[in-house]
């Protein structure tokens, strides 16, 4: 189908054209924060699952013969692991967020969302009949004001939607304050733990590990620190049952392969078995920040952006680092706000202090 040439040319002129590039060099760009994607235990879990039932694919949607024992085992284990009544396994975090916001909130309800929240939530809100209200990023007072405004306009139910760790800035949501607001206004708090699962919390359950309550709905992506694919929605039993019955992205999608469910369960257990991985990531993060962002406040996570501003600078800097053996990628608008094009640098458990020092030196060379 033709007709897009002019738009593609505009993207090239504005330094926003994207293309696919294979991994090369030392990984400072992926979301494989714990280094699990190549872990022998996950490979063994997949092989064992294949040997047990021979299923490469699920064979159908979860409600039409695509529900297998590995899915049931994962969801039961995950519910206990994250301390909730039930969990539901989706094929991706995008599908899970889209399902949440197109299913749970109706036209009498309101969703208060952080202005920097992930595109999957924003797409869900575009397709939702609920009223949506944008709050300033990580500003608890702004959230409270928007919740009051929604109540004054007659919202029946209110959902507060945030990420616990933001994927482009690496900063942390004020979950304690947001939890208090949710309780005060009898609202549901929907927390996307995509970049926190496996890394944050006393036991790696996410930034909200010690706060999870009946009014919480949490999403734990399985393709980032857990190294596999898919996402787990964790909530009270009624919410999960409603999603099974009403969430179109769940009902009308082929189920994830059972072997992936088995691998995710194994990955959750590995978080407990190998805590050194998250400890190493969080120990290196401030060291990297001080080396590449001197004088700026540390956002607090394993995601350390280098803001370059002009859109044309970021791709060039990324190419320079790649030529020196470091796989760092550029991020430009509309993924990030205008004027904040950046290098998004992320750490993983397999990095050492020497790797961080070498990257900082290479970045100085490239930017000079």
Image (spheres, grey):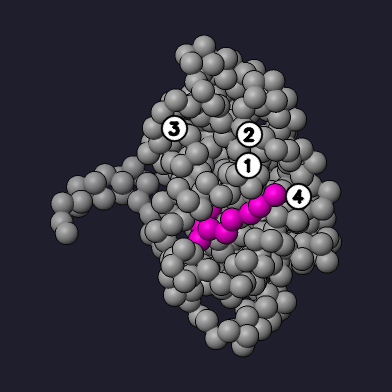
Sequence-wise, the earlier of marks 2 and 3 is 3
Q: Tell me the CA gap for discs 4 and 3.
A: 27 Å
Q: Tell me the CA gap for discs 1 and 3.
A: 17 Å
Which mark is on residue 199? none
Which residue is farthest left?
2
Is any atom of residue 142 visible in this view? no
Label 1 residue SS: strand
Labels 1 & 3 near each other (Cβ < 8 A): no
Labels 2 & 1 near each other (Cβ < 8 A): yes
Residue range in magenta is: 85-93
Q: Tell me the CA gap for discs 2 and 4.
A: 16 Å
Labels 4 & 1 near each other (Cβ < 8 A): no
> Crowding at label 2, few (<14), some or many (≥20) Cα neighbours within 10 Å?
many
Which sits in the foreground, 87 or 164? 87
Sequence-wise, the earlier of marks 4 and 3 is 4
Q: Is residue 165 highlighted in magenta?
A: no
Image position, residue 25 (x, y; %): 59, 68
Which sits in the foreground, 265 or 27? 265
> Crowding at label 1, few (<14), some or many (≥20) Cα neighbours within 10 Å?
many
Image position, residue 21 (x, y; %): 45, 65
Sequence-wise, the earlier of marks 2 and 4 is 4
Between circles 1 and 3, the one closer to the viewer is 3
> Crowding at label 4, few (<14), some or many (≥20) Cα neighbours within 10 Å?
some
Query: Relative to 122, is 52 on the left or the right?
Result: right
Residue named by callout 1: 217
Residue named by callout 3: 106
Residue named by callout 2: 189
């Amino acid at each position: 189908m033709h007709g897009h040439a002019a738009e593609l040319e505009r993207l090239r002129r504005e330094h926003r054209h994207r293309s696919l590039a294979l991994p090369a060099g030392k990984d400072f760009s992926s979301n494989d924060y714990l280094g699990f994607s190549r872990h022998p235990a996950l490979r063994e879990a997949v092989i064992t699952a294949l040997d047990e039932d021979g299923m490469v694919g699920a064979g159908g949607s979860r409600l039409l013969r695509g529900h297998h024992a590995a899915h049931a085992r994962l969801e039961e284990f995950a519910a206990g692991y994250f301390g909730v009544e039930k969990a539901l396994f989706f094929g991706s975090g995008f599908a899970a967020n889209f399902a949440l916001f197109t299913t749970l909130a109706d036209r009498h309800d309101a969703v208060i969302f952080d202005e920097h929240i992930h595109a999957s939530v924003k797409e869900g809100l575009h397709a939702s009949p609920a009223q949506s209200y944008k709050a300033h990023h990580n500003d608890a007072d702004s959230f409270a004001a928007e919740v009051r405004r929604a109540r004054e306009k007659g919202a029946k139910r209110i959902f507060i939607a945030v990420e616990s760790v933001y994927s482009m800035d690496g900063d942390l949501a004020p979950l304690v304050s947001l939890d208090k607001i949710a309780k005060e206004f009898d609202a549901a708090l929907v927390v996307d733990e995509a970049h926190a699962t496996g890394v944050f919390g006393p036991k790696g359950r996410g930034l909200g590990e010690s706060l999870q309550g009946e009014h919480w709905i949490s999403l734990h992506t399985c393709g980032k620190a857990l190294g596999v694919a898919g996402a787990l929605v964790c909530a009270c039993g009624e919410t999960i049952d409603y999603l099974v019955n009403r969430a179109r992205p769940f009902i009308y999608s082929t189920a994830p392969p059972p072997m992936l469910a088995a691998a995710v369960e194994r990955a959750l257990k590995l978080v407990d078995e190998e805590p050194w991985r998250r400890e190493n990531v969080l120990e290196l993060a401030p060291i990297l920040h001080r080396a590449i962002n001197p004088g700026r406040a540390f956002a607090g996570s394993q995601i350390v952006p280098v803001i370059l501003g002009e859109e044309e600078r970021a791709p060039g800097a990324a190419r320079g680092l790649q030529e020196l053996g470091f796989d760092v990628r550029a991020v430009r608008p509309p993924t990030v706000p205008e004027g904040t094009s950046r290098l998004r640098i992320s750490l993983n458990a397999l990095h050492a202090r020497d790797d961080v020092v070498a990257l900082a030196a290479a970045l100085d060379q490239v930017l000079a």
